[in-house]
Image (cartoon, helix red, strand yellow):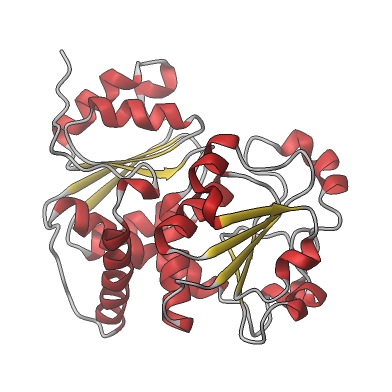
Amino acid sequence: MKTSNKTVRHFLTLTDLSSTEFRDIIERASELKAMQHRGEIFEPLKNKVLAMIFEKSSTRTRVSFETGMAQFGGHAIFLSPRDTQLGRGEPVEDSARVLSSMADCLMVRTFEHEKAELLAEYSSVPVINGLTDDVHPCQLLADMQAYFEHRGDIRGKTVTWVGDGNNMCHSYMHAAKMLEFKLNIACPKGFEPQQAFIDETHDFIEITQDVAAACTGSDLIVTDVWASMGQEEEQKIREQAFADFQVNSELMARANDDALFMHCLPAHRGEEVSADVIDGTQSVVWDEAENRLHAQKALLEFLLVN
């Protein structure tokens, strides 16, 4: 018997939010950040439990969710494939029913997006996507919070994605449509985003192989590693394909003078980004990384308190 509760809100992709909710969460994240920096104790999730299912390894996702739950007065349980029956072949549907009967929220970081969708379908509590092969929506909450904090509203601005048309790129495409900015996607031939995402966001994006043109007049330049988790065996092929797609000072010089640089990390200096850019004055990667904590706290509050 399926025990799904139709009133439960999930966060599997940015489009599970309205544009207004997206902006509200960004604003709330900055408020929560200020409160935490002032040392204020705020515990809206006292006695609440977040069960975190990790099938892909993680630093920022795990630490930000665990810390966020602790700061909110709740508790987070880390479940790796070695620690759960999921790793031994228990159906996702069964795990969803069991975990959601005990925990107040589930977070999943996995490979196939369908697995996150299946978890949500059979869960009686909110499910948060901590990353799938298709999208990485939590990272976009943090990235957009960082942009708003440094430069104000991103509406009408130009953002340039340099590199692989991967899960991060897909979430940037969703954000472009929802927050109404223009997204230039500079990627090598054969590494374009999935067609479904192109169809969904075509009015707000432009795909090109001309990386210099894509960066010209940009307000924000973003990149990611050339080979994502699970693609390591393609590293050599990708190094050749992406050789001309490194974000360096020459590319940054083509952007607007006050352009920012972002990267979801971990970064490979000397590959997708030069050291002088990621460690330079236009880089906001450390604020962006810290914002995973605050943005996800705002998301947890939105899903579990509001």
Residue 105 visible in the picture: yes
Residue farthest top in this picture: 1
Q: Quadrant of residue 177?
A: bottom left
Q: Quadrant of the N terminus?
A: top left
Question: Residue 218 or 242: which is nearer the viewer?
Answer: 218
Instruction: Give the image location of residue 101, x and y in percent.
Output: 14, 30
Q: Is residue 131 left or right of residue 246?
A: left
Instruction: Give the image location of residue 269, x and y in percent.
Output: 75, 64
Instruction: Give the image location of residue 275, x and y in percent.
Output: 75, 72
Identified at 41% across, 54% down, the residue is 138
Identified at 19% across, 46% down, the residue is 49
Q: Quadrant of the C terminus?
A: bottom left
Q: Quadrant of residue 12?
A: top left
Q: Quadrant of residue 34?
A: bottom left
Q: Is residue 149 left or right of residue 18?
A: right
Measured along the vertical axis of the image, is residue 102 above or below residue 166?
A: above
Q: Is residue 171 left or right of residue 297?
A: right
Measured along the vertical axis of the image, is residue 48 above or below residue 265?
A: above
Measured along the vertical axis of the image, is residue 264 above or below residue 54?
A: below
Measured along the vertical axis of the image, is residue 254 above or below residue 235?
A: below
Number of on-image labels:
0
Instruction: Give the image location of residue 288, x and y in percent.
Output: 49, 69
Question: Residue 45 or 216: which is nearer the viewer?
Answer: 216
